[in-house]
Image: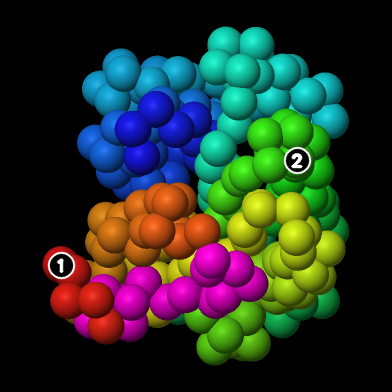
């Protein structure tokens, strides 16, 4: 990944941070974003010698400013990872232990999750595509979740928002055919230890939860030249690791 320019949204912590760090280790110039975690992305950027930019992906102005800043500084965008998302903590702090029916949810929280996970992904991808078309190359990676989580009781609107992301991914992949831009979906394959796990979850239930770093090998592969012909795939990190015998 030497010299490649990568944007990773929602990289203040968890999955996004893990991807940003492994990209930097592999030689990429990494731009990490967050809507609110200014100190965290600045600390990570300093650590990996990357660039930190505060941007709310649900706001067209923020998205435009972010993409323009990257192009002005680096003249290209090789990789874009749609990781930024709002989870169930914004809807129900005890969603893992005390799931609530959708009719008890707050409409404002519902809109925030859907707006970030669906509209934010659309706005960011829409913004980076023109530069990738100009370059005649690009990698887009959309971070998703297990199918079971999409249908799990008490997990709306998070589950449905990720189902929408996968539908968008399937459609966009077809529309990008013949452009030398690939778009793939990447997920863990199990519950992951990150900020959306509620503090109230008992310690015994945290056993077996995957660490964010599990996603790193597949994330690097999909961004590399070796994956030039990998398009429209749904890759589960833990299965991919086993298949390729990568730890």
**x, y percentage for residue 104?**
77, 72
Q: Are marks 1 and 2 in contact (CB under 8 Å)?
A: no
Vertical arrangement, residue 214 with respect to residue 85, above or below: below
Quickly name the residue at label 2. 133
| Residue 247's disc number | 1
Provide the secondary structure element on which disc 2 rests.
helix
Residue at 24% over, 76% down: 244
* Residue 115 appears left or right of 236: right
Distance from disc 1 to disc 2, alpha carbons, whole Å, reads 34 Å
Q: Is residue 3 above or below residue 92?
A: above
Specify the quadrant of the image occupied by residue 141.
bottom right
Q: Tell me if mark 2 has few (under 14), some (14-19) or many (20+) residues whose alpha carbon lies within 10 angstroms of its own.
A: some
The answer to whether one can see residue 166 in this image is: yes
In magenta, the rendered stretch is 229-242
Q: Earlier in the sequence, mark 1 or mark 2?
A: 2
Residue at 36% x, 72% y is 237
- Image coordinates of residue 158 in percent, x first then y, are 65, 67
Single out the mark in the foreground, 1 or 2: 2
Q: Quadrant of residue 211?
A: bottom left
Whole-percent x, y for residue 6 in the image: 49, 35
Other residues around mark 1 within 10 Å, as few (<14) / some (14–19) / many (≥20): few
Give yes or no for residue 210 being in the magenta stretch. Answer: no
Quarter of the rendering occupied by the N terminus: top left
Quarter of the figure with the C terminus: bottom left
In this view, 84 is above or below 245: above
Q: Is residue 78 left or right of residue 58?
A: left
Q: What residue is rendered at 33% in x and 82% in y?
A: 239
Q: Which element carries disc 1, helix, strand or loop?
A: loop
């Amino acid at each position: 990944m030497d010299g490649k320019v990568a944007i990773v949204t929602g990289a203040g912590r968890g999955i996004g941070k893990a991807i940003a760090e492994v990209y930097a280790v592999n030689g990429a110039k990494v731009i990490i974003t967050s809507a609110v975690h200014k100190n965290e992305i600045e600390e990570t950027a300093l650590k990996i010698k990357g660039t930190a930019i505060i941007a709310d992906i649900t706001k067209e102005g923020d998205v435009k400013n972010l993409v323009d800043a990257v192009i002005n500084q680096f003249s290209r965008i090789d990789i874009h990872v749609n990781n930024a998302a709002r989870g169930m903590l914004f809807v129900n702090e005890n969603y893992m232990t005390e799931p609530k029916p959708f009719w008890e949810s707050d409409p404002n929280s519902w809109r925030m999750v859907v707006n970030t996970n669906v509209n934010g992904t659309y706005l960011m991808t829409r913004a980076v595509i023109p530069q990738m078309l100009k370059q005649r190359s690009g990698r887009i990676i959309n971070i998703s979740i297990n199918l079971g989580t999409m249908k799990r009781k008490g997990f709306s609107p998070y589950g449905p928002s990720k189902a929408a992301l996968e539908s968008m991914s399937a459609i966009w992949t077809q529309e990008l055919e013949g452009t030398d831009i690939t778009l793939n979906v990447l997920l863990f394959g199990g519950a992951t230890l990150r900020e959306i796990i509620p503090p109230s979850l008992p310690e015994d239930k945290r056993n077996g939860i995957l660490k964010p770093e599990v996603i790193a090998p597949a994330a690097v592969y999909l961004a590399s030249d070796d994956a030039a012909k990998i398009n429209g795939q749904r890759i589960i990190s833990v299965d991919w690791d086993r298949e390729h015998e990568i730890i």
